[in-house]
Image: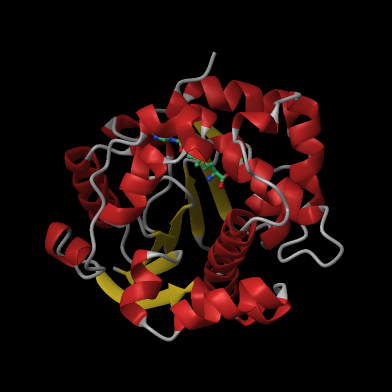
């Protein structure tokens, strides 16, 4: 039995699975559909999650942007360590396909890692760490001294603020240099997830208050520097959306402030 925070992995897995069934998918992760099928999870628990919904675009394209951050980093640093925080049942390592010199770590709660081992294909060569990210001890199992890229896809909303700040400081204190990227949870986004019928099953797990200024994490962890704010409302993939969706997204995309509030944003920091 998963907690609401753990169950949220089915929203992102389901979003990618539905995307892969589109005639022209944004991400095209057919493995997500295979894994979802193995779990037997009923996506009806997220009413309204359908391939036509902008949520599927958001999930698929933000995952794609985070994949690109990791892909670029490991191309520049073949000795890199990759941390996928709150990996759920995602198989990012298969999409990125890093060289064997890269050390890849997928971290999620022990209950989730047990299911990962049951439903993910054996060729997933990442190390799976079963741990609560708010517990400092899991970092002892990760090599230090190598350039490190850290991603959190759909994670931050589930971390209490104090624990999030402590985690940022532990991460930036533990590795010599690297990048950190995650999707932005604004205060509006947090309120929306908590109130919408479509996300009611996971609402109880959303404990982070969100933040509106992407520079704020620089105050919380001194080594972090905001490098890029990636607005999905301005993604090239918008051109592939239906006419109606495209017009709506493009009109929001003209304003950075609106894109931040209503749209999905990926934040990339260096340290
Ligand atoms: C929305 S899901 C995203 C999963 C995956 N990144 C994806 O894109 O499919 C959020 C994930 O974060 C994990 N998570 C939340 N809080 C965590 C914590 N304190 N420690 C470890 N994992 C956590 C949940 O178990 C869940 O798998």
Observer able to see residue 130:
no
Q: Position of residue 197 (x, y in %)?
A: 49, 36
Q: Position of residue 223 (x, y in %)?
A: 20, 66
Location of the N terminus by quadrant is top right
Percent coordinates x, y for residue 44 in the rendering: 67, 31
Q: Quadrant of residue 265?
A: bottom left
| Up-down relation of residue 155 to residue 268 (above or below) | above
* Side of 181 where 163 appears, left or right: left
Could you tell me which residue is drawn at 31 percent across and 39 percent down? 159
* Quadrant in which the C terminus appears: bottom left
Q: Residue furthest right?
A: 23
Seen from the viewer's position, the closer of residues 172 and 54 is 54
Residue 85 picture quarter = top left
Q: Answer yes or no: is residue 147 visible.
A: yes
Camera-nearest residue between 28 and 82: 28
Colour setup of the view:
secondary structure
Q: Look at the picture and state if 1 lies above or below 78.
A: above
């Amino acid at each position: 039995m998963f907690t609401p925070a753990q169950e949220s992995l089915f929203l992102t897995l389901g979003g990618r699975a539905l995307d892969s069934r589109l005639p022209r998918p944004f991400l095209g992760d057919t493995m997500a559909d295979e894994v979802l099928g193995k779990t037997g999870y009923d996506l009806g628990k997220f009413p309204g999650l359908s391939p036509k919904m902008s949520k599927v675009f958001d999930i698929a394209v933000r995952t794609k942007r985070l994949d690109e951050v990791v892909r670029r980093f490991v191309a520049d640093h073949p000795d890199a360590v990759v941390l996928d925080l709150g990996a759920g049942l995602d198989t990012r390592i298969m999409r990125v396909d890093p060289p064997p010199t890269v050390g890849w770590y997928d971290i999620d709660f022990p209950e989730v890692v047990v299911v990962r081992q049951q439903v993910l294909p054996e060729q997933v060569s990442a190390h799976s760490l079963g741990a609560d990210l708010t517990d400092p001890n899991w970092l002892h199992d990760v090599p230090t001294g190598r350039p490190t890229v850290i991603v959190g896809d759909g994670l931050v909303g589930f971390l209490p603020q104090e624990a999030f700040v402590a985690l940022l400081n532990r991460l930036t204190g533990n590795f010599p240099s690297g990048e950190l990227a995650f999707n932005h949870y604004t205060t509006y986004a947090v309120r929306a997830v908590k109130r919408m019928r479509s996300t009611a099953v996971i609402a109880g797990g959303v404990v982070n208050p969100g933040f509106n200024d992407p520079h704020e994490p620089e105050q919380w962890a001194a080594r972090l520097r905001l490098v890029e704010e990636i607005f999905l409302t301005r993604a090239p993939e918008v051109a592939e959306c239906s006419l109606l969706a495209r017009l709506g997204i493009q009109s929001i995309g003209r304003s950075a402030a609106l894109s931040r509030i209503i749209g999905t944003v990926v934040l990339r920091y260096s340290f």
